[in-house]
Image (cartoon, rainbow, N blue to C red):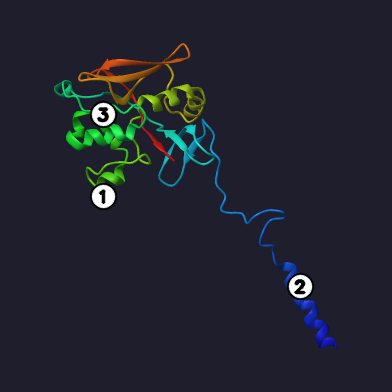
Amino acid sequence: MRKELYFLVVLCALVSCQKPETPQGGEPQGPHQHTYEIGEYYHNDTLEGVVFWTFGDHNGLMVSLDEAYLTWCEPGNINCETGATNPYEGWNNTNILMDVYDMSHYPAIQWSYLKNTWHLVNYPHRKIINKQWYVPSTTEMRYLLQNQEAVNATLASMGYPTLEGKTYWSSTETGTRGAAAVRLQNGEVVISDSLKTLEFYVRAIRNF
């Protein structure tokens, strides 16, 4: 009788220690995913930037912490119409330039492309996708500048240059000699057809 009672106590103890397979009243929980907000600092083992646009809870666009001051193209290439006219997807404009031209003739576009160091080392001249760094299109620049207040707060807190009061190149070509430069003026996003050999600021963006 004692032996049977002992095994009964052990069995009850084992059952009570087991955790339920699902939370009370719910489905099994998957791995935790962070929900990002506009202006939040994004970082993982290899990437960092500031979130400026979100779609869904866990995806969006982030902008680079650093920037450069460059021409869209060199003087010798100003009469070359590239066809990089996509107003929505900047990574697509980069790929169009890569199809035909030496990227070194397009300093602003090359600067962002060179941020994908691992990509260049392993696959030279391979096309990029939206989850690699690129110069934003006019539409993507609009999203960025519309949310610059939150982005600037994070950049300033980390000691990086802010977007305030600057004109930025987009990757969107407007014609043979021009490309679209974008700035925020009196609270409104202004897009101007600018000579490609002028120097403006440039930031890189990417999907996360």
Residue 65 locus on image (x, y percent): 41, 32
Q: Circle 1 sits in a helix, a strand or a loop, which is it?
A: helix
Q: Quadrant of the C terminus?
A: top left
Secondary structure of residue under mark 3: loop
In the figure, is residue 28 to the left or right of 122? Answer: right
What's the mark number on residue 122? 1
Disc 2 to disc 1, how far (Cα)? Answer: 56 Å
Image coordinates for residue 85, horizontal then vertical, percent = 28, 26
Label 3 vs label 2, nearer the camera: 3
Q: Distance between the residues labelled 3 and 1?
A: 25 Å
In the displayed structure, 55 sits above or below 182; it is below
Relative side of 30 to 148, left or right: right
Q: Which residue is situated farthest in the left direction here? A: 76
- Residue tagged by mark 2? 13
Of the numbered discs 3 and 1, the one sitting upstream in the chain is 3
Q: Do the residues labelled 2 and 1 touch (CB within 8 Å)?
A: no
Label 2: state its secondary structure: helix
Quarter of the image for residue 165 reads top left
Tell whether label 2 touches label 3 (CB within 8 Å). no
Residue labelled with disc 3? 84
Look at 48% across and 14% down and name the residue there.
187
Residue beneath the point at 26% across and 36% down:
95
